[in-house]
Amino acid sequence: MTGVLVVDDDPHLLKILKIALETNGYSVTTAADGRSALLAATQHPLGLVILDLGLPDIDGNTVIRKLRSWNRVPILVLSARHTSDDKVEALDAGADDYLTKPFGPDELLARLRALLRRTVDLPPSDPIVATDNFTVDLAKHRVTRDGADVRLTPIEWNILELLVKNPEKLITHRQLLTEVWGPAYAKDSNYLRVYMAQLRRKLEPDTSNPRHLLTEAGIGYRFQP
C-alpha cells in the first residue's frame, strides 16, 4: 500500500480525506500542523504528501522547503489559496502539483495517480520517452517524429529535456528559465513563449491545440506523454 501523509488543520477535512484515500487502497497518516507533518515524514515510509498551505504554526511553503531538503516524495498542495502567485510560490518551493479547494474527489485521486506514475524512473538502459506523435531519446539527445529526426536548437532541447524528465509535473516559468538560461533570466518569460512556440511547431500535430506540451496560464508548462 502506498503511504500518504495528509496535512491540514481542518479535522473534518482530514477525516474525509483519510476515509476516501483508505477506501482507494492508500495507507494514510494525518497531521494538523507543519511540525507534526515534518516529524511524521521521518517516521513513516511515504509515497505521497497532500499539504495545505495555511497551517497554524509553519506556513506550508516552509514545510515544502524543509521536506525537500532531504526527501523527494511527491507533494500535492491542496489549498484555498488560488492566485497564480500562490501556485508559483508553492511549485518553486518544491511542490509537484497544486489543487485548489473546493475540489472533487475524483480529480484528487487522478492527480495522485499521475504523481505516482511520474515517480517511476525510466530504465537506465532505455531512457526513451515516447508519445503518439514523437519520441525523445534522452541518452542520444535525439528526437524523432514519423521516423525522421527533428532538428532542435540547444535551448529547445534543454527545455524539452526538462519537461519530459518530469512527465505530468507542472514546471513553472521560473524553474524553466533558471535551469535553461540561468538565474539572471528568471523573470524573462518572453523567452519561453518564443521557444515553446517553436517546439510545438516541430512536435505537435496541431499547434493551436497541443496534446503534449501544455500551458498552465500564468504559471508554467506541463509535459503530457
Image (spheres, rainbow, N blue to C red):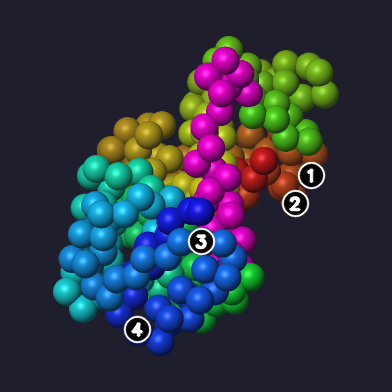
Q: Quadrant of residue 140?
A: top right
- The range drawn in magenta is 107-128
**Is tag 2's residue or tag 4's residue first in the polypeptide sequence?**
4
Q: Residues within 10 Å of mark 4 (few under 14, many from 20)?
A: few
Of tags 3 and 2, the one toward the viewer is 3
Q: Residue furthest top?
A: 140
Contact (Cβ within 8 Å) of mark 3 with mark 2: no
Contact (Cβ within 8 Å) of mark 2 with mark 4: no
Q: Amino acid at mark 1?
A: Asp
Could you say which is closer to the camera, residue 73 or residue 166?
73
Question: What residue is shown with label 4?
Answer: 10
Q: Amino acid at mark 3?
A: Tyr
Q: Is residue 221 above or below residue 102?
A: above
Q: Amino acid at mark 4?
A: Asp
Residue 174 drawn at (x, y percent): 38, 47
Q: Amino acid at mark 2?
A: Asn
Q: Is residue 94 above or below residue 192?
A: below
Question: What residue is shown with label 1?
Answer: 206
Question: What residue is shown with label 3?
Answer: 26
153 within the magenta span: no
Q: CA separation, marks 1 and 4?
A: 44 Å
Could you say which is closer to the camera, residue 216 or residue 128?
128
Q: Can residue 194 be seen in this snapshot? A: no
Q: CA separation, marks 2 and 4?
A: 39 Å
